[in-house]
Amino acid sequence: MMPTPVILLKEGTDSSQGIPQLVSNISACQVIAEAVRTTLGPRGMDKLIVDGRGKATISNDGATILKLLDVVHPAAKTLVDIAKSQDAEAVNKIKEIAVTVKKQDKVEQRKMLEKCAMTALSSKLISQQKVFFAKMVVDAVMMLDELLQLKMIGIKKVQGGALEESQLVAGVAFKKTFSYAGFEMQPKKYKNPKIALLNVELELKAEKDNAEIRVHTVEDYQAIVDAEWNILYDKLEKIHQSGAKVILSKLPIGDVATQYFADRDMFCAGRVPEEDLKRTMMACGGSIQTSVNALVPDVLGHCQVFEETQIGGERYNFFTGCPKAKTCTIILRGGAEQFMEETERSLHDAIMIVRRAIKNDSVVAGGGAIEMELSKYLRDYSRTIPGKQQLLIGAYAKALEIIPRQLCDNAGFDATNILNKLRARHAQGGMWYGVDINNENIADNFQAFVWEPAMVRINALTAASEAACLIVSVDETIKNPRSTVDPPAPSAGRGRGQARFH
């Protein structure tokens, strides 16, 4: 008699296990790797990704590409999640050979930071302008305080003009907001102004839809109208009495208020985006007020110069010489919207690299040099270990050669020839030799200033090792069927209702 099968899982559940599942997981991860490997290096290609809404994104940033891909395979999804965040023997070797740049030597430190930024930008769309943008990125990060808060660097995009017209503003800058008549009469430049930061509506409020006021005489109606105007003028008078010359509000500032401020040589901007208002507060001091009844000097901000300037087809408000916190704004110029978005992503990568290099001042040579040195070290180390672990470490050493090999493939070089030269040179003690993209050869990439923060390589190796261990350790995947919730059936009274089976 056949034993009765015991069913533990819901009908429709997909379960796969064993060696085929392991191979499927590895294959899925290889597909993910194929999607980004051709983006590596200065000769890497870009990817055009179109989402479900039809928005096109052009990028060669691996993390951006993986974020935009709609990955459904569970193992591959794990790899994507690890890639968004970025083995012991390899990590220790990096720490041992990394070169430390002394923080006391400001000139040397700045050179190191610029080289790291240029290395990060050399594989981007803006690689032709990498010297220009590397200097801008280092200037931007050096303006920050010790915390190096990323949100204190604002990046604004203005279409039109050449890339070289991009500029770094030592302070806060944001696009001019919608304004009413009377705005043209307001001054566009102040020196040492007091700044009021408000979350207050400075216009006559519309009546609520369901409100009803019954009046019997014209005088009663006029009293209500006068009361509304008096409330508004009372607010405006209190702002004027505070001594503030620049008024910024997250909520609208109406035409009456605009004209009121213009008559008193004051500048106002309503509907300021919250992030810009907060950045102004962190830079110029003061605090955002939800009422005008307590505009004491302590809650007002200060800056050395406020100015409104034309950039391309846009008007921008500039706050420079901010005493409270160190902040800056990068204004990007360029043509197509997708190109400017990719430029912004490229600068973000460079900023992150520079921040990390400041916090951890050890650098290694890029261009496949550090990977080849680690590969040589692990291959030699594996020969000292008996048993199957030797094969594992040897395989790790071989896997590290994928980076220089892919750099050669992307540049159209003979990868086998270049790798043989690199192996020979590293065996002779040429620690920092890597791929020379410009001359189709090998070169000392440390002397060529192809530098990367050591911490970036350590994090990449650690994340890659974790991902590989995670994928190989999974031998079964169970997918539950997508549950569908039906609307409740209408009540069938006391009769016999219909039974529903799922």
Image: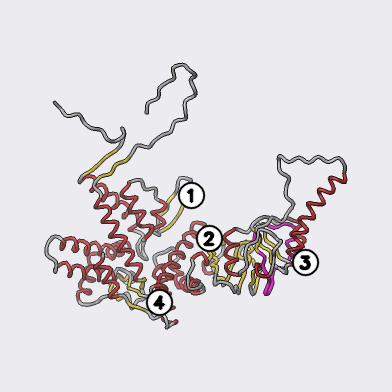
Query: 10 Å neighbourhood of mark 3: few (<14), some, or many (≥20)?
Result: few
**Mark number displayed over residue 112:** 4
Camera-near label (4 vs 3) is 3
Give the residue at mark 1.
55
> Is 174 left or right of 29, judged from the image as shown?
right
Above or below for 416 versus 211:
below
Tell me the kind of residue under disc 3. Arg
Cα separation between marks 4 and 1: 38 Å
Identify residue for label 3: 264
Q: Is residue 109 left or right of residue 447?
A: right
Residue 13: quarter of image? top left
Q: Quadrant of residue 197?
A: bottom right
Q: Is residue 165 visible?
A: no
Q: Nearer the N terminus, badge 4 or badge 1?
A: 1
- Which residue was labeled with disc 2? 335
Q: Earlier in the sequence, mark 4 or mark 3?
A: 4
The residue type indicated by label 1 comes to Lys
Tag in front: 4 or 1: 4
In this picture, which residue range is highlighted in magenta?
176-196
Element assignment for label 2: loop
The Cα atoms of the two marked residues, 3 and 1, are separated by 46 Å
